[in-house]
Image (cartoon, rainbow, N blue to C red):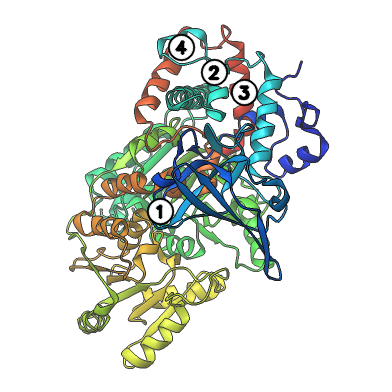
Amino acid sequence: MADLKTDVRFIKGIGEQRAKALAKLGIHTLQDLISWFPRCYEDRTKTRRIADLVPGETACVCAMVASVPAVSHIRRGLDLVKVRAVDETGALDVTFFNQSWLKTSLRPGETYVFCGRAEGNLLRRRMANPIVEPEGRREATGRIVPIYPLTAGVSQLVLSRSVRQGLDACGDILPDVLPDEVRQNHRLCRVGFAYENIHFPADGEALTLARRRLAFEELFLFTLGLRRLRQRREVVEVEPFRPVDMEAFYGALPFTLTEAQRRCVEEALGDMASGRPMNRLCQGDVGSGKTMVAAACAYFCVKNGRQAALMAPTEILARQHYEGLAPLLEPLGIRCALLTGSHTAREKKALAAALAAGEADFILGTHALITGGLEYRRLGLVVTDEQHRFGVGQRAALVGKGDHPHTLVMSATPIPRTLALILYGDLDVSVIDRLPPGRRPVQTSFVDSSYHPRIYRFLRKLVGEGRQAYIVCPQVSESEEGGDDRKAVTEYAAQLQREVFPDLRVAYVHGKMKPKEKDAVMAAFAARETDILVSTTVIEVGVDVPNAAVMVVENAERFGLSQLHQLRGRVGRGPWQSYCVLVSDNQNEETRQRLKVMTRTTDGFKIAEEDLRLRGPGDFFGRRQHGLLGLRVADIGCDAQLLKEAQAAADALLERDPELTSCPATAERMAELFTEAADTLN
Ligand code: ADP
Ligand code: MG
């Protein structure tokens, strides 16, 4: 009898060879195997008559081979097998590429099931490369077929056969990680049924039940884990920060903090004075003024005799924070330091020494803050800016640099509520829900490339009024195939300079430039030495040049809505009217609708929700981040109701049985999940 940790090699019917292939997918144990869930399904239960095939649609037909398969050698590396199949309603021409072995295995007079996309017209029906199997031995058709995520060397059939073996090996031993009571209260199916039907659904209904149960299970365990993390933190005691007269700080600012900013500061200060480690998310739309909240917290921390660190996702941003905050804080007696990857080894060493000796109070930087083997003297606060850009592990690493430092996570991504609950379930949240006064919403338009002459005239006019402009082109990428109209940043900038704006100052910046070069370009732009900055999305996050009043986005269809929102947030930071022009020639109706959302609203939350709805959570956060959540079945875009139920169930269970003594299987699975994920969570 197997247990779930059994190596797949030892499962009957799998063996060394296949185990090797599976290992490529990261499948090592029986548990891995049965948890390798299909990415989608194809309903191949029904067969159609040949006469009923609709060109363009995928279908199965049951037909008799009516000709001897003919093989032709088209060219090197391309063989073709052609065969004619018939049923009582008509004939179907079937071709197979590079499967010459079918010549002998398809026997005239025998009946097979062909499953594929029908082509041709009503008179001549064709199918290219269908799945084919003998009518009497159906495996890949005749049922709802799971479609698995694959890698080279593992086919759908190999995978589904392996899973079949895996499930058979499990027999009845699958432990149910959901306590029976929870399962029944929420009308969830049993674990055996769930695994069986998520892989090999008996019918649509069974699949729905299976999916619901497994999604619930994930969300339930996830919630338990987050609650556990929070509890653990709540028992940690740290020396409470003393009250500090903040007026000196406020008085040094060039403006009055908004009420929303003040509230966030007070909430954070309250946390740090509480004697428990702060773990707070400060969420505010682009331009809402999160930096000052961070600065206030750093001030408070340093005045308590501790060091503070601020980690930004890019060099540009780290430097900008440093250049903005150092002049403000230094006169208040706070020694600021900047550390980025582009410092020389010697500079880094000096800085590290200063840090360790406690000669720097507030250190700003990129992830070099955690990779450099830095020793802090008395790290009391860690702020991460634009946190969704960091692997959660990086955040954890920085926190590990101190003895339970307070943490403040700042995010401009207006995360839809369902996602926030999952991502930040163990964080306290402050929201900056108002922009600083005097901002005017950015006017956004959506045009095609025939508008370029007008756009250029418009840019010229605004530059004439003293403003500056950004033009964003999609990322330069080596893997890009030629032949599309993607404009490389450098070429585009050169062309603009030469042909359109010979008298203006055009510069460019992209991600492949050296950090020093990037910084120089950004600094020149901030100092108004450049009129038009052509860039990739390196400016997407956080860059703050209030004089910039136009954002033109080329090939706007290549960006997600949230990304466009971030880009647009680069303008509209000064007192004048700002503009965003989205340029796209894409004719896809869905794409056009998506881009139109941008012209209708400037509300980041609405945009994020729309984005999540249209693209799904995987794209919203990037695949990797989504993977970090460890959710394979649950879809946080759509399972909001289920999430609520799972959370309620988890809370009720913890209330009853905080140590989970009544359900060891639950406790064990959760421990597994969260030791694997320990450094990926806060
Ligand atoms: P974000 O939340 O996107 O990080 P920033 O902190 O970069 O926003 O602030 C955006 C701009 O607003 C900056 O130029 C900043 O100086 C300015 N700002 C911040 N707070 C205020 C305020 N209370 N009043 C006026 N301007 C402010
Ligand atoms: Mg910011």
Question: Do callouts 4 and 1 mark residues in contact (Cβ within 8 Å)?
Answer: no
Q: Is residue 275 above or below residue 623?
A: above
How far is disc 4 from disc 1 in space, using C-alphas?
Answer: 48 Å
First-in-chain label (2 vs 4)? 4
Alpha-carbon span between mark 4 and mark 3: 19 Å
Which of pointers 2 and 3 indicates the residue nearer the eye? Answer: 2
| Disc 4 residue type (three-letter) | Val
* SS class, disc 2: helix
Q: CA distance from mark 2 to mark 1?
A: 37 Å
Using the numbered discs, state the Cα–Cα distance from disc 2 to disc 3 in whole angstroms: 24 Å
As rendered, which of 268 and 335 lies closer to the eye?
268
Residue wearing tag 3:
671
Instruction: Label 4: state its secondary structure.
Output: helix
Q: Which residue is mark 2?
A: 193
Name the front one of labels 4 and 3.
4
Q: Is mark 1 within 8 Å of ligand 1?
A: no
The residue tagged 1 is: 55
Disc 3 versus disc 1: nearer the observer: 1
The amino acid pointed to by label 1 is Pro
Q: Judging from the image, what secondary structure is the residue with disc 1 in?
A: loop
Q: Quadrant of ligand 2?
A: bottom left
Hey, what amino acid is under mark 2? Phe
- Considering depth in this image, is 422 or 263 the residue closer to the camera? 422
Which mark's residue is nearer the viewer, 2 or 1?
1
- Which of the marked residues, 4 or 3, is nearer the chain's N terminus? 4
Q: Position of residue 41 (x, y in %)?
A: 50, 37
Residue in view at x 37 percent, y 33 percent: 270
